[in-house]
Image (cartoon, rainbow, N blue to C red):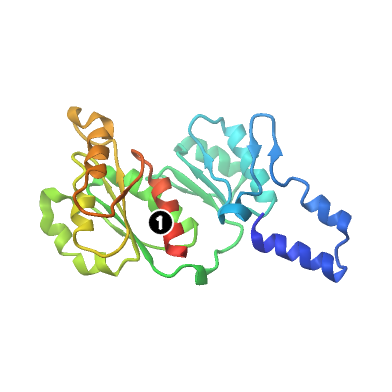
Amino acid sequence: MTAEQLRQILQLVRSGELSPEEAVDRLRTLPFEDLGFAKVDHHRAIRTGMPEVIFGAGKTVDQIVEISQRLAARGQDVLITRLGAEEARQVQVHLPDLVYHPVGRIAVWRKTEPSPNLRRGTVLVVAAGTADLPVAEEAAVTAEALGNKVERLHDVGVAGIHRLLAHVERLRRAAVLIVVAGMEGALPSVVAGLVDRPVIAVPTSVGYGASFRGLAALLAMLNSCAAGVTVVNIDNGFGAAVAANLINRA
Protein backbone atom coordinates (compact mmCIF):
# COMPACT_ATOMS: atom_id res chain seq x y z
CA MET A 1 0.00 0.00 0.00
CA THR A 2 1.22 3.47 -0.88
CA ALA A 3 0.66 6.72 0.98
CA GLU A 4 -1.73 7.83 -1.79
CA GLN A 5 -3.82 4.64 -1.47
CA LEU A 6 -4.04 5.14 2.30
CA ARG A 7 -5.11 8.75 1.76
CA GLN A 8 -7.85 7.60 -0.63
CA ILE A 9 -9.21 5.14 1.96
CA LEU A 10 -9.35 7.86 4.60
CA GLN A 11 -11.12 10.22 2.19
CA LEU A 12 -13.71 7.53 1.38
CA VAL A 13 -14.38 7.04 5.10
CA ARG A 14 -14.73 10.78 5.60
CA SER A 15 -17.19 11.06 2.70
CA GLY A 16 -19.24 8.10 3.94
CA GLU A 17 -18.57 5.99 0.83
CA LEU A 18 -16.62 3.49 2.94
CA SER A 19 -17.57 2.31 6.42
CA PRO A 20 -14.96 2.19 9.20
CA GLU A 21 -15.35 -1.61 9.24
CA GLU A 22 -14.63 -1.82 5.50
CA ALA A 23 -11.61 0.43 5.94
CA VAL A 24 -10.30 -1.80 8.73
CA ASP A 25 -10.70 -4.81 6.44
CA ARG A 26 -8.65 -3.13 3.73
CA LEU A 27 -5.95 -2.19 6.24
CA ARG A 28 -5.99 -5.53 8.00
CA THR A 29 -2.62 -6.68 6.63
CA LEU A 30 -0.85 -3.54 7.82
CA PRO A 31 1.90 -3.43 8.83
CA PHE A 32 2.74 -6.94 7.59
CA GLU A 33 1.23 -10.22 6.41
CA ASP A 34 2.61 -13.46 7.88
CA LEU A 35 2.98 -16.19 5.24
CA GLY A 36 4.81 -18.56 7.54
CA PHE A 37 8.07 -18.50 5.56
CA ALA A 38 8.00 -14.71 5.18
CA LYS A 39 6.37 -11.63 6.68
CA VAL A 40 5.39 -9.39 3.77
CA ASP A 41 5.83 -5.74 4.71
CA HIS A 42 2.86 -3.96 3.10
CA HIS A 43 3.55 -0.86 5.19
CA ARG A 44 7.03 -0.21 3.81
CA ALA A 45 5.92 2.05 0.95
CA ILE A 46 4.14 4.32 3.43
CA ARG A 47 7.20 4.50 5.69
CA THR A 48 9.95 4.77 3.09
CA GLY A 49 8.34 5.67 -0.24
CA MET A 50 9.06 2.33 -1.92
CA PRO A 51 7.52 -1.14 -1.46
CA GLU A 52 9.30 -4.22 -0.18
CA VAL A 53 11.66 -5.68 -2.77
CA ILE A 54 12.09 -9.44 -3.20
CA PHE A 55 15.65 -10.79 -3.11
CA GLY A 56 15.29 -13.81 -5.38
CA ALA A 57 18.49 -15.69 -4.58
CA GLY A 58 17.91 -18.43 -2.03
CA LYS A 59 14.12 -18.43 -2.41
CA THR A 60 12.09 -21.10 -4.16
CA VAL A 61 9.91 -20.17 -7.13
CA ASP A 62 6.80 -20.89 -5.06
CA GLN A 63 7.97 -18.49 -2.36
CA ILE A 64 8.75 -15.77 -4.88
CA VAL A 65 5.37 -16.24 -6.57
CA GLU A 66 3.40 -16.06 -3.33
CA ILE A 67 5.19 -12.95 -2.07
CA SER A 68 4.79 -11.31 -5.49
CA GLN A 69 1.08 -12.09 -5.64
CA ARG A 70 0.49 -10.74 -2.12
CA LEU A 71 2.28 -7.49 -2.98
CA ALA A 72 0.44 -7.15 -6.30
CA ALA A 73 -2.94 -7.83 -4.67
CA ARG A 74 -2.35 -4.88 -2.35
CA GLY A 75 -1.57 -2.52 -5.22
CA GLN A 76 2.20 -2.65 -4.84
CA ASP A 77 4.68 -2.72 -7.66
CA VAL A 78 6.82 -5.87 -7.60
CA LEU A 79 10.60 -5.79 -7.98
CA ILE A 80 12.58 -9.03 -7.83
CA THR A 81 16.38 -8.91 -7.78
CA ARG A 82 18.92 -11.70 -8.37
CA LEU A 83 16.42 -13.79 -10.30
CA GLY A 84 17.63 -16.48 -12.70
CA ALA A 85 16.20 -16.77 -16.20
CA GLU A 86 14.49 -20.11 -15.60
CA GLU A 87 13.01 -18.93 -12.30
CA ALA A 88 11.77 -15.78 -14.03
CA ARG A 89 10.03 -17.87 -16.70
CA GLN A 90 8.22 -19.85 -14.01
CA VAL A 91 7.19 -16.72 -12.11
CA GLN A 92 5.83 -15.20 -15.34
CA VAL A 93 3.34 -18.06 -15.56
CA HIS A 94 1.66 -16.56 -12.49
CA LEU A 95 2.45 -12.89 -13.25
CA PRO A 96 2.25 -12.68 -17.06
CA ASP A 97 3.05 -8.96 -17.15
CA LEU A 98 6.30 -9.43 -15.25
CA VAL A 99 9.17 -7.97 -17.31
CA TYR A 100 12.48 -9.77 -16.94
CA HIS A 101 15.84 -8.09 -17.62
CA PRO A 102 18.31 -10.97 -18.11
CA VAL A 103 21.54 -8.97 -17.98
CA GLY A 104 20.71 -7.43 -14.62
CA ARG A 105 18.91 -10.60 -13.39
CA ILE A 106 16.02 -8.43 -12.23
CA ALA A 107 12.26 -8.47 -12.89
CA VAL A 108 9.60 -5.78 -12.59
CA TRP A 109 5.81 -5.95 -12.38
CA ARG A 110 4.24 -2.52 -12.31
CA LYS A 111 0.80 -1.68 -10.94
CA THR A 112 0.99 2.06 -11.52
CA GLU A 113 3.32 4.52 -13.16
CA PRO A 114 5.36 6.62 -10.70
CA SER A 115 4.66 10.34 -10.35
CA PRO A 116 7.20 12.10 -12.58
CA ASN A 117 7.00 15.36 -10.61
CA LEU A 118 8.87 13.68 -7.75
CA ARG A 119 11.97 13.21 -9.89
CA ARG A 120 14.07 16.24 -10.70
CA GLY A 121 17.02 14.94 -12.69
CA THR A 122 18.72 12.09 -14.49
CA VAL A 123 20.47 9.18 -12.83
CA LEU A 124 23.47 8.25 -14.97
CA VAL A 125 24.77 4.70 -14.54
CA VAL A 126 28.42 4.46 -15.61
CA ALA A 127 30.06 1.06 -16.07
CA ALA A 128 33.83 0.60 -16.33
CA GLY A 129 33.70 -2.56 -18.45
CA THR A 130 31.34 -4.95 -20.17
CA ALA A 131 31.90 -7.49 -17.39
CA ASP A 132 30.40 -4.96 -14.94
CA LEU A 133 27.12 -4.77 -16.86
CA PRO A 134 25.10 -7.22 -14.67
CA VAL A 135 25.60 -4.97 -11.63
CA ALA A 136 25.18 -1.78 -13.65
CA GLU A 137 21.90 -3.05 -15.15
CA GLU A 138 20.61 -4.06 -11.73
CA ALA A 139 21.18 -0.45 -10.68
CA ALA A 140 19.68 1.04 -13.85
CA VAL A 141 16.52 -1.10 -13.87
CA THR A 142 15.96 -0.52 -10.14
CA ALA A 143 16.30 3.24 -10.55
CA GLU A 144 13.87 3.16 -13.49
CA ALA A 145 11.39 1.06 -11.52
CA LEU A 146 11.48 3.69 -8.78
CA GLY A 147 10.48 6.35 -11.29
CA ASN A 148 13.77 7.97 -12.22
CA LYS A 149 14.92 8.98 -15.67
CA VAL A 150 17.97 6.79 -16.24
CA GLU A 151 20.79 6.99 -18.78
CA ARG A 152 23.58 4.46 -19.31
CA LEU A 153 27.24 4.95 -20.17
CA HIS A 154 29.13 1.70 -20.65
CA ASP A 155 32.74 0.55 -21.14
CA VAL A 156 34.49 3.76 -20.13
CA GLY A 157 37.04 2.37 -17.66
CA VAL A 158 40.35 4.02 -16.86
CA ALA A 159 42.35 1.65 -19.09
CA GLY A 160 41.16 3.87 -21.95
CA ILE A 161 40.53 7.15 -20.15
CA HIS A 162 39.83 8.97 -23.41
CA ARG A 163 36.56 7.00 -23.68
CA LEU A 164 35.37 8.61 -20.44
CA LEU A 165 36.66 12.11 -21.23
CA ALA A 166 34.66 12.07 -24.46
CA HIS A 167 31.51 12.18 -22.27
CA VAL A 168 32.43 14.81 -19.67
CA GLU A 169 29.50 17.08 -20.52
CA ARG A 170 27.11 14.17 -20.21
CA LEU A 171 28.58 13.32 -16.81
CA ARG A 172 28.08 16.89 -15.65
CA ARG A 173 24.44 17.03 -16.76
CA ALA A 174 23.40 14.12 -14.53
CA ALA A 175 21.77 14.79 -11.16
CA VAL A 176 23.25 11.65 -9.57
CA LEU A 177 25.90 9.26 -10.88
CA ILE A 178 26.20 5.56 -10.09
CA VAL A 179 29.69 4.40 -11.07
CA VAL A 180 30.28 0.65 -11.32
CA ALA A 181 33.76 -0.84 -11.54
CA GLY A 182 35.76 -3.94 -10.71
CA MET A 183 39.49 -4.63 -11.02
CA GLU A 184 41.24 -1.80 -9.10
CA GLY A 185 38.03 0.25 -8.80
CA ALA A 186 39.54 3.56 -9.93
CA LEU A 187 36.71 4.87 -12.10
CA PRO A 188 34.53 6.48 -9.35
CA SER A 189 37.49 8.59 -8.17
CA VAL A 190 38.10 9.85 -11.69
CA VAL A 191 34.43 10.64 -12.27
CA ALA A 192 34.10 12.39 -8.90
CA GLY A 193 37.05 14.60 -9.84
CA LEU A 194 35.14 15.82 -12.91
CA VAL A 195 31.65 16.61 -11.57
CA ASP A 196 29.89 18.54 -8.80
CA ARG A 197 27.21 15.90 -8.37
CA PRO A 198 26.74 12.99 -5.92
CA VAL A 199 28.76 9.96 -6.99
CA ILE A 200 27.72 6.53 -5.70
CA ALA A 201 30.47 3.96 -6.24
CA VAL A 202 29.69 0.27 -6.71
CA PRO A 203 32.60 -2.20 -6.55
CA THR A 204 32.07 -5.41 -8.48
CA SER A 205 33.54 -8.86 -8.00
CA VAL A 206 35.11 -8.67 -11.49
CA GLY A 207 38.89 -9.10 -11.60
CA TYR A 208 41.85 -11.44 -11.32
CA GLY A 209 43.05 -13.21 -8.17
CA ALA A 210 44.38 -10.23 -6.21
CA SER A 211 41.09 -8.41 -6.67
CA PHE A 212 39.77 -10.79 -3.96
CA ARG A 213 36.31 -10.94 -5.58
CA GLY A 214 35.79 -7.20 -5.34
CA LEU A 215 37.48 -6.47 -2.04
CA ALA A 216 40.32 -4.60 -3.75
CA ALA A 217 37.85 -2.38 -5.61
CA LEU A 218 35.83 -1.82 -2.45
CA LEU A 219 38.89 -0.69 -0.48
CA ALA A 220 40.07 1.55 -3.34
CA MET A 221 36.67 3.26 -3.46
CA LEU A 222 36.55 3.69 0.32
CA ASN A 223 40.02 5.29 0.11
CA SER A 224 39.14 7.55 -2.82
CA CYS A 225 41.10 10.80 -2.90
CA ALA A 226 38.09 12.46 -4.56
CA ALA A 227 36.01 13.96 -1.77
CA GLY A 228 32.39 12.94 -1.27
CA VAL A 229 32.30 9.55 -2.99
CA THR A 230 29.69 7.28 -1.39
CA VAL A 231 30.38 3.54 -1.54
CA VAL A 232 27.96 0.60 -1.36
CA ASN A 233 28.71 -3.09 -0.92
CA ILE A 234 30.30 -5.34 -3.53
CA ASP A 235 27.95 -6.02 -6.49
CA ASN A 236 25.16 -4.03 -4.78
CA GLY A 237 23.66 -2.25 -7.78
CA PHE A 238 20.26 -2.36 -6.09
CA GLY A 239 21.47 -0.49 -3.02
CA ALA A 240 23.17 2.14 -5.15
CA ALA A 241 19.95 2.73 -7.09
CA VAL A 242 17.89 3.15 -3.91
CA ALA A 243 20.40 5.72 -2.61
CA ALA A 244 20.33 7.55 -5.95
CA ASN A 245 16.54 7.57 -5.90
CA LEU A 246 16.46 9.16 -2.43
CA ILE A 247 18.94 11.83 -3.52
CA ASN A 248 17.02 12.52 -6.72
CA ARG A 249 13.74 12.93 -4.80
CA ALA A 250 15.19 15.34 -2.24
Looking at the image, which residue is at 32% across and 66% down?
Answer: 174
The foreground one among 156 and 21 is: 21
Question: What residue did someone put label 1 on?
Answer: 244
Give the image quarter of residue 69: top right
Give the image quarter of residue 206: top left
Q: Is residue 14 above or below residue 202?
A: below
Please state the horizontal and vertical placement of residue 208, each as a whole percent of the image: 18, 31
Residue type pointed to by label 1: Ala
Looking at the image, which residue is at 18% across and 29% down?
Answer: 210
The answer to whether 139 appears left or right of 145 in the picture is: left
Assign a secondary structure to mark 1.
Answer: helix
Label 1 crowd bin: few (<14), some (14–19), many (20+), radius 10 Å = many
Looking at the image, which residue is at 21% across and 53% down?
Answer: 226
Tell me if I can see residue 176 in this picture.
yes
Looking at the image, which residue is at 19% across and 65% down?
Answer: 168
Please state the horizontal and vertical placement of residue 235, each as a whole percent of the image: 35, 40
Please state the horizontal and vertical placement of residue 240, each as a whole percent of the image: 39, 49
Tell me if I can see residue 77 in this picture.
no
Q: Is residue 48 above or below residue 123?
A: above
